Amino acid sequence: MSTIDFGTFDALTFDCYGTLIDWEAGILAALRPLVGGAVGDETVLEAFARHEAQLEAGPYLPYREVLAGCLRGLGEELGFEPSEAQQAAFGASVADWPAFADSPEALARLKERFRLGVITNCDDDLFAASSRRLGVEFDWVITAQQARGYKPRRENFAFALERIDVPRERLLHVAQSLFHDHVPAQALGMTTVWVDRRQGRAGAGATPPAGATPDLTTPDLKTFADLATRSPSPSR
């Protein structure tokens, strides 16, 4: 049973990678030829999370360069040396990361009722490639490239709130990562829904662990869309 009154919201904002796009599958597909089969998936993903968070906390770099830096760090940690071409290919691999199977249909249903936005840790052109896989036109697209920094900075959400013409209390943020999204969004007073894509799997995967208490948890986007579109229309 939902504990959120969806009728009080006019718009939904989403994290993209991990929530709408299966970035863990994409990361592993791109890394496996380099890492080999001796290292387990969760070890690879958790190492990626450490390197990505460290790079994103420093001076701003385009996401392609963040991924290239992650690959260099993984190489040092796991015993391989990526070439410049391999670093560039991993940086561009975002365009190949698949959408979760339920994302396009769920977003299409949600679009019939809510305005939709994305607040994503990515470059404009890489997100544009991912957006084509999702099959929906977002009303707002806020990228790390635009904000010149990465979540979990609160500044990314403040930047988004300045550009979204909907009052904060009528925005609902939907995301998988507690670390990147729920902690900073809730710090700014936003209501959040956790799409727990890793439900039943140990560890935190490609996102660093963090403590947060989302207002609602669902196992996937279809379940969230079922709840959000079943409720009465937004009340003003």
Image (spheres, rainbow, N blue to C red):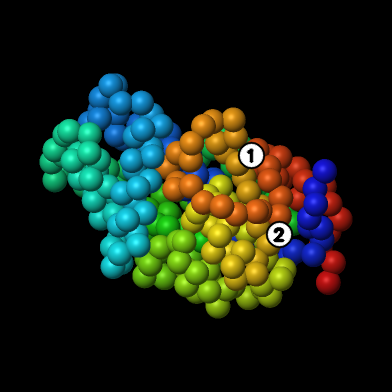
In terms of secondary structure, where does tag 1 sit?
loop
Q: Position of residue 192 (x, y in %)?
A: 65, 57
Measure the C-alpha gap from mark 1 to mark 2: 18 Å
Residue 107, above or below 25: below
Q: Please state if 224 lies on the left or on the right of 24 as rendered.
A: right
Under circle 2, the secondary element is loop
How many numbered markers are drawn? Answer: 2
Mark 1 or 2: the one toward you: 1
Q: Is residue 156 above or below residue 88?
A: below
Residue 88 position within the rendered picture, expressed as x and y whole percent measured from the top left: 21, 47
Q: Nearer the viewer, residue 42 or 84?
A: 42
Which part of the image, by quadrant, shows the N terminus? Answer: top right
Which residue position is annotated with label 1?
Answer: 220
Can residue 161 be seen? yes
Image quarter (top left, top right, bottom left or bottom right) of the C terminus:
bottom right
* Mark closest to the chain's N terminus, 1 or 2: 2
Q: Where is residue 146 drawn, in percent x and y?
A: 40, 69
Q: Is residue 235 left or right of residue 18?
A: right
Neighbor class of circle 1 (other Cα within 10 Å; few <14, some 14-19, many 20+) is many
Residue type of the residue flagged with mark 2: Phe
Q: Residue at x 76, y 50 (%)?
A: 228
Q: Residue 114 — which label? A: 2
Residue 229's disc is none
Contact check, label 1 and label 2, Cβ < 8 Å:
no
Q: Residues within 10 Å of mark 2 (few under 14, many from 20)?
A: many
Identity of the residue drawn at 79% across and 64% down? 8
Q: Position of residue 126 (x, y in %)?
A: 37, 53
**Residue at the spot 64% in from the left edge and 39% down from the top edge:** 220
Q: Amino acid at mark 1?
A: Asp
Q: Quadrant of residue 166?
A: bottom right
Relative to residue 213, is residue 80 depicted above or below?
above
Q: Is residue 229 left or right of residue 111?
A: right
